[in-house]
Amino acid sequence: MEERRVIHEITPLMGKDALYIADRRKKEFTYPIHNHEVFELNFVEHAPGVRRIVGDSNEIIGEYDLVLITSPDLEHVWEQNNCTSDDIREVTIQFYLDMSDDGFLSRTPFISLRKMLLEARKGLAFPLSAIMRVYREIDSLSSVKDGFYAVMQFMSVLYELSRCPGARTLATSSFAKVEVESDSRRVLKVKNYIAKNYMDEIRLTTLAEIAGMSPSAFSRFFKLHTGRNLSEYIIEMRLGYASRMLVDTAKSIAEISYQSGFNNLSNFNRIFRKRKGCSPSEFRETYHKTRIVV
């Protein structure tokens, strides 16, 4: 069986370059799963049926797809899967922006842009409404000859995207190695506790006590602030850690199951397949295949 490996890509963005833009027409996706230091906005059209993998997210895309990735460790790939289109277009824009606390993007006019770039450490997929809002600018970006105007046009794309509702993160924070964040101090304390104790039994009463609330009041409070039931959040975090171990270690699936907090192997396999659309062994195989890139 052909194997595929995760490639840490050395991108064409070199030295003092501000942008690297690749605007391609092609009949298939052949590049292997990879990650890279620079940020990337990837737009795909006319490729329904392509499988997009970002971290532990695995989805089939439609006619249009737009994803922003700002983590050097987050593996990603667009796979041909069952796409039959012979007129695929892919526009890949690679760039880097200073995200330091005292950098230019920390200034007030860029608050929404900075927030989006931080969220994109887990991969950020944009809805069709957002894609259509910036389609013209992405479509023409590779034809802008003046570097300054190209950068300004691209920054306007990022800014418009940061103002569009409906963008959703793809990888789980535990897989993407991103620290949990919250707008509520109580929720953050609970999330940090779960992140440190995900491998053990986690009781609602314990979490409610940490938050200083009754169990029923805390359950409602957590759902209100996170949009997810507490049990769903814990399962998602455990699956993220399990997925990362499947990629980064040679541990058996049984070991990984217990070390990620699942009480038995069959339960882990069932939940993993239901949430990820494949078995743990199939997930591992996807990441560990190798392809020679010429």
Image (cartoon, grey):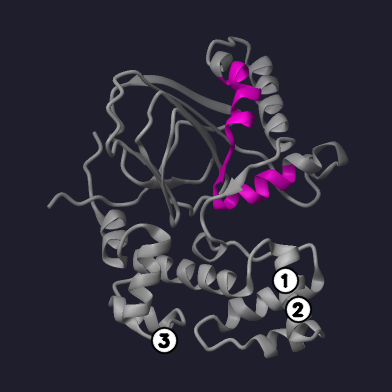
Looking at the image, which residue is at 72% across and 71% down?
222
Task: Give coordinates of residue 237: x percent, y percent.
Answer: 53, 70
Q: Kindly state the secondary structure of the residue where label 2 is placed.
A: helix
Per the image, is 118 magenta?
yes
The residue to which callout 1 is attached is 222
Rounded to the nearest angstrom, the CA distance separating label 2 from label 1 is 6 Å
Q: Which type of secondary structure does the marked residue at label 1 adopt?
A: helix
Residue 258: name its quadrant. Answer: bottom left
* Disc assigned to residue 218: 2
Where is 46 relative to 224, above or below? above
* Residue drawn 53% across the image and 66% down it: 174
Position of residue 4 relative to residue 43, above or below, is below
- Residue found at the far left of this picture: 1
Label 1: how many Cα within 10 Å (few below 14, some 14–19, many 20+): many
Q: Quadrant of the C terminus?
A: top left
Q: Where is residue 74 in the image (x, y as percent from the top left)?
A: 48, 52
The answer to whether marks 2 and 1 mark residues whose Cβ atoms lie closer than 8 Å is yes
Kindly identify which numbered label has been placed on residue 263: 3
Asked whether, in this view, residue 12 is left or right of residue 224, the answer is left
Q: Magenta span has 112? A: no
Q: What residue type is labelled 1?
A: Phe
124 versus 197 height, above or below: above
Give the magenta part as a residue range.
114-138
Which kind of residue does numbered mark 2 sit on?
Phe
Quick check: can you spot residue 245? no
Label 3–label 1 contact, CB within 8 A: no
